[in-house]
Amino acid sequence: MAISEAALGPDHPDVGIRLNNLGGVLRDLGDLPGAREQYERALAIGEAALGPDNPTVRTLRRNLDSVTTH
């Protein structure tokens, strides 16, 4: 993640997507708190960069919801 953030900046939408993917891996490993942290950051980046109604942002929100409703 550090390489992506250094190359693109910490608030770049691609960094958000990578954080989302990391959240998915952590969720699959059973680390729900870790997944939630990554999903929250991904969503914040996505909303700021793309707006709250963007289809990608809706996916990010759904992923966050998947670890907060359990």
Image: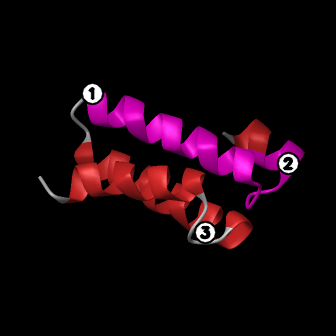
Q: Mark 3 or mark 1: which is in front?
A: 3
Q: Earlier in the sequence, mark 3 or mark 1?
A: 1
Distance from disc 3 to disc 1, alpha carbons, whole Å, reads 26 Å
Write down the residue under mark 2: 8
Q: Which mark is residue 29?
A: 1
The amino acid beneath tag 1 is Leu
Task: Give the image location of residue 63, x and y in percent.
Answer: 37, 48
* Residue located 39% across and 29% down the image: 25
**Element at label 2:** helix
The amino acid beneath tag 2 is Leu
In front of the other: 51 or 20: 51
Distance from disc 3 to disc 2, alpha carbons, whole Å, reads 17 Å
In front of the other: 23 or 63: 63
The amino acid beneath tag 3 is Glu
Write down the residue under mark 3: 47
* Residue located 76% across and 48% down the image: 5
